[in-house]
Amino acid sequence: MTLFEAAAALLQAVEDSWTEVDVLPSRRYVSNGAVAHDCEQATVAILRTYAGTPSALASGPTQGMATRTATLRAEVARCVPSTDEGGPMPSAAGIQDSAEEVHRDHDLLIIAARKFAKESGCEEVIIGDALPFGPEGGIAGWGLEVRAQLG
Protein backbone atom coordinates (compact mmCIF):
# COMPACT_ATOMS: atom_id res chain seq x y z
CA MET A 1 0.00 0.00 0.00
CA THR A 2 1.35 3.42 -0.92
CA LEU A 3 1.35 6.40 1.41
CA PHE A 4 -1.47 8.13 -0.46
CA GLU A 5 -3.49 4.90 -0.71
CA ALA A 6 -3.33 4.51 3.08
CA ALA A 7 -4.51 8.09 3.62
CA ALA A 8 -7.29 7.71 1.06
CA ALA A 9 -8.40 4.42 2.68
CA LEU A 10 -8.63 6.14 6.07
CA LEU A 11 -10.70 8.95 4.54
CA GLN A 12 -12.98 6.34 2.95
CA ALA A 13 -13.41 4.66 6.36
CA VAL A 14 -14.39 8.05 7.79
CA GLU A 15 -16.93 8.57 5.00
CA ASP A 16 -18.33 5.06 5.50
CA SER A 17 -18.74 5.53 9.26
CA TRP A 18 -21.11 8.49 9.09
CA THR A 19 -24.84 7.93 8.66
CA GLU A 20 -27.66 9.95 7.20
CA VAL A 21 -28.39 11.21 10.73
CA ASP A 22 -24.77 12.16 11.42
CA VAL A 23 -23.99 14.13 8.28
CA LEU A 24 -20.31 14.43 7.39
CA PRO A 25 -19.25 17.80 5.95
CA SER A 26 -19.25 17.76 2.14
CA ARG A 27 -15.68 19.13 1.87
CA ARG A 28 -13.41 16.04 2.17
CA TYR A 29 -9.80 15.53 1.12
CA VAL A 30 -6.36 14.07 1.84
CA SER A 31 -3.75 16.68 2.73
CA ASN A 32 0.02 16.62 2.83
CA GLY A 33 0.66 18.11 6.26
CA ALA A 34 -1.39 20.25 8.60
CA VAL A 35 -4.89 21.32 7.59
CA ALA A 36 -6.32 24.86 7.88
CA HIS A 37 -9.42 24.93 10.06
CA ASP A 38 -11.38 27.51 8.08
CA CYS A 39 -14.62 25.68 7.27
CA GLU A 40 -16.54 22.49 7.94
CA GLN A 41 -14.57 19.61 6.49
CA ALA A 42 -13.39 16.02 6.90
CA THR A 43 -9.71 15.49 6.20
CA VAL A 44 -6.86 13.04 6.50
CA ALA A 45 -3.44 14.65 6.82
CA ILE A 46 -0.21 12.80 6.15
CA LEU A 47 1.93 13.91 9.10
CA ARG A 48 5.09 11.84 8.66
CA THR A 49 6.61 8.50 7.75
CA TYR A 50 9.40 6.56 9.43
CA ALA A 51 11.30 3.29 9.19
CA GLY A 52 9.85 0.70 11.52
CA THR A 53 6.50 -0.66 12.64
CA PRO A 54 3.59 1.34 14.11
CA SER A 55 4.13 -0.16 17.56
CA ALA A 56 7.79 0.94 17.55
CA LEU A 57 7.82 4.71 17.29
CA ALA A 58 10.70 6.15 15.30
CA SER A 59 13.72 6.70 17.51
CA GLY A 60 16.25 7.81 14.94
CA PRO A 61 17.92 6.68 11.74
CA THR A 62 17.84 2.99 10.91
CA GLN A 63 19.71 0.92 8.38
CA GLY A 64 17.57 -0.12 5.48
CA MET A 65 13.91 0.66 5.16
CA ALA A 66 12.23 -2.71 4.93
CA THR A 67 9.13 -1.56 6.81
CA ARG A 68 7.64 1.94 6.59
CA THR A 69 4.99 3.43 8.81
CA ALA A 70 2.82 6.46 8.12
CA THR A 71 1.37 8.69 10.82
CA LEU A 72 -1.99 9.98 9.61
CA ARG A 73 -4.45 12.35 11.29
CA ALA A 74 -8.17 12.13 10.53
CA GLU A 75 -10.13 15.25 11.45
CA VAL A 76 -13.68 16.51 11.32
CA ALA A 77 -14.14 20.28 11.71
CA ARG A 78 -17.51 21.91 12.42
CA CYS A 79 -18.86 25.43 12.60
CA VAL A 80 -19.65 26.27 16.22
CA PRO A 81 -21.41 29.23 17.82
CA SER A 82 -19.10 32.18 18.31
CA THR A 83 -19.26 35.92 18.77
CA ASP A 84 -18.36 38.61 16.35
CA GLU A 85 -16.41 41.49 17.79
CA GLY A 86 -18.92 43.30 19.98
CA GLY A 87 -21.74 40.93 19.01
CA PRO A 88 -24.04 39.01 21.33
CA MET A 89 -22.81 35.90 23.13
CA PRO A 90 -24.11 32.60 21.76
CA SER A 91 -26.79 30.92 23.84
CA ALA A 92 -25.85 28.13 26.23
CA ALA A 93 -28.30 25.83 24.41
CA GLY A 94 -26.63 26.60 21.07
CA ILE A 95 -23.19 25.88 22.50
CA GLN A 96 -24.37 22.60 24.02
CA ASP A 97 -26.12 21.47 20.81
CA SER A 98 -22.94 22.21 18.87
CA ALA A 99 -20.81 20.35 21.44
CA GLU A 100 -23.05 17.31 21.10
CA GLU A 101 -22.45 17.21 17.33
CA VAL A 102 -18.70 17.74 17.68
CA HIS A 103 -18.39 15.02 20.33
CA ARG A 104 -20.47 12.61 18.24
CA ASP A 105 -17.84 13.15 15.53
CA HIS A 106 -15.22 11.97 18.05
CA ASP A 107 -17.05 8.68 18.53
CA LEU A 108 -17.45 8.22 14.78
CA LEU A 109 -13.73 8.90 14.18
CA ILE A 110 -12.94 6.04 16.57
CA ILE A 111 -15.34 3.77 14.66
CA ALA A 112 -13.73 4.84 11.37
CA ALA A 113 -10.22 4.11 12.67
CA ARG A 114 -11.28 0.65 13.81
CA LYS A 115 -12.85 0.01 10.39
CA PHE A 116 -9.60 1.15 8.72
CA ALA A 117 -7.54 -1.12 10.98
CA LYS A 118 -9.75 -4.11 10.13
CA GLU A 119 -10.21 -3.53 6.38
CA SER A 120 -7.18 -1.59 5.09
CA GLY A 121 -4.91 -4.56 4.55
CA CYS A 122 -2.13 -2.88 6.54
CA GLU A 123 -0.21 -5.47 8.55
CA GLU A 124 -0.30 -3.32 11.70
CA VAL A 125 -2.40 -0.29 12.65
CA ILE A 126 -2.18 1.62 15.93
CA ILE A 127 -4.98 4.02 16.86
CA GLY A 128 -3.45 6.91 18.74
CA ASP A 129 -4.76 9.84 20.72
CA ALA A 130 -7.90 11.75 19.85
CA LEU A 131 -7.42 15.46 20.52
CA PRO A 132 -9.96 18.29 20.26
CA PHE A 133 -9.18 21.55 18.49
CA GLY A 134 -10.85 24.96 18.70
CA PRO A 135 -13.10 26.66 19.11
CA GLU A 136 -11.24 29.27 17.17
CA GLY A 137 -12.73 31.42 14.45
CA GLY A 138 -16.05 29.63 14.82
CA ILE A 139 -14.53 26.19 14.05
CA ALA A 140 -14.01 23.25 16.43
CA GLY A 141 -13.61 19.51 16.08
CA TRP A 142 -11.62 16.40 16.79
CA GLY A 143 -8.52 14.85 15.28
CA LEU A 144 -7.38 11.25 15.64
CA GLU A 145 -3.89 9.97 14.89
CA VAL A 146 -3.51 6.59 13.23
CA ARG A 147 -0.18 4.87 12.55
CA ALA A 148 -0.30 2.39 9.67
CA GLN A 149 2.37 0.02 8.39
CA LEU A 150 2.83 0.59 4.68
CA GLY A 151 4.97 -2.45 3.97
Image (cartoon, rainbow, N blue to C red):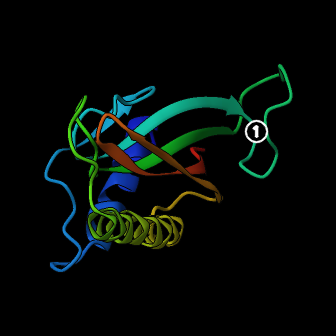
Residue 54 percent across, percent down from the top left: 71, 49
Mark 1: which amino acid? Gly
Where residue 57 sits, quadrant-wise, is top right
- Say which residue appears at 77% left-offset and 24% top-offset: 64
- Across and down, in percent, residue 146 comes to 57, 51
83 relative to 140 in the view: left or right: left
Q: At which x and y percent is residue 37? A: 33, 34
Question: What count of labels does the image hold?
Answer: 1
Residue at the spot 86% in from the left edge and 29% down from the top edge: 59
- The answer to whether 110 is drawn above or below residue 130 in the figure is below
| Quadrant occupied by the C terminus | top right
Q: Residue at x 20, y 38 (%)?
A: 87
Label 1 element class: loop
Q: Is residue 31 left or right of residue 57?
A: left
Q: Nearer the viewer, residue 110 or 118?
A: 110
Circle 1 crowding by C-alpha within 10 Å: few under 14, some 14–19, many from 20: many
Question: Who is closer to the viewer here, 52 or 147?
Answer: 147
| Coordinates of residue 95 in the picture (x, y in percent) | 33, 62
Q: Is residue 132 above or below residue 97?
A: above
- Residue ID for mark 1: 52
In the displayed structure image, the side of residue 58 where residue 24 appears, left or right = left
